[in-house]
Image (cartoon, grey):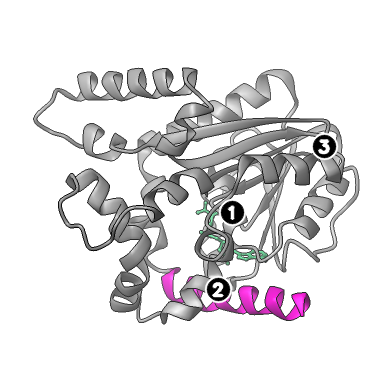
Amino acid sequence: MKIDKIKEAIEANIFVHTIMADDYNSVEPHFRPESIDRVENIIQKINKDKIIDKVLDLGCGTGFMINIVKKRANEIVGVDVTQAMMDKVDTSGKASIKLINADTGTVSLPQNYFDLVTAYTFLDHLYDMKPTFINVFNALIKDGVFYADLSPNYYFWEGVKKLDPNFNLYEPIIQREVDAVWKKDQEIEFQFGIDKETFKKAEHQKHTKGGLMEEELRDLLLNTGFSKVEFIYHWFIGQAQLINDESINKELRYSQADFIHQNLIKTLPLSRNLFKYIGFIATK
Ligand SMILES: C[S@@+](CC[C@H](N)C(=O)[O-])C[C@H]1O[C@@H](n2cnc3c(N)ncnc32)[C@H](O)[C@@H]1O
């Protein structure tokens, strides 16, 4: 039954994230300054047209998004099922920060209340996104914004999965991604002692469904009642190797990465299988 599957995914997430909580901020690449800058720019863009006073952050974890929005918002609510992750949230500063230990699909929230709802590297952890989307829609004010990001892009993983895991002659940039599909669970088992099945259940939308698909998300969001959805694709294949290549002057490698990114964005949707992540900005 679906309800059992939802429960199973939640339990797997609590298990995995309780183990990862202590090291989470230091091992996860989205905590690097350039990644924080990217998200800050997106929030700034949203804030140009809308007030960001009350924010709800779904799957808030250790507070990645809370740290970014607390410079602008007065009231922030974070929701997460893993207490060990929420225990790391820095609640200092002028904003009132309330943390709720609950599932985002069933948590009780004030209606027509939040200006902005965020979900960063989170949606792929849900067994079913629909109950969460309904909850978000009801909790947002009219014209409020739902910003979700850093979810695995279905089209990227679909392409990688078609490659031969035993070929071994791919360029290292590609081999890395092939290994991520076929060996990531082994790596996690080795590094954190988390068994493969639990790891897969914790990231159901990635490991079982193959990632988040633009068309499916659009349908789901519009059917929930959102009036407009804009998609974000980012982190092209090879971007990490380029920006970390110390043989090139830092300014040059960053401007080259930006040039490639902008050109790939111009060639969407043809280029969408080259981006690892998908995000969206949906308006109520
Ligand atoms: C990959 S972490 C992301 C944390 C944070 N958003 C960030 O950007 O660092 C995913 C978080 O989602 C939480 N989570 C998973 N399923 C959940 C659910 N159904 N309801 C609420 N939180 C959930 C996990 O406990 C974990 O803290």
- The numbered mark, 1 or 2, whose residue comes first in the sequence reads 1
Query: In what quadrant of the picture does the N terminus appear?
Result: bottom right
Percent coordinates x, y for residue 55 in the rendering: 72, 43
- Determine whether, in the image, residue 123 is placed left or right of residue 259: right
Work out whether 12 lies above or below 30. below
Q: How busy is the neighbourhood of tag 3: few (under 14 within 10 Å), some, or many (20 plus)? A: many
Q: Amino acid at mark 3?
A: Phe
Q: How busy is the neighbourhood of tag 1: few (under 14 within 10 Å), some, or many (20 plus)? A: some
- Determine whether, in the image, residue 100 is placed left or right of residue 65: right
Q: CA distance from mark 1 to mark 3?
A: 31 Å
Which residue range is magenta in the image? 1-21
Whether label 1 touches label 2, CB < 8 Å: no
Query: In what quadrant of the picture does the C terminus appear?
Result: top right
Q: What residue is pinned by disc 3?
A: 226
* Residue 30 in view (yes/no): yes
Q: What residue is pinned by disc 2?
A: 201
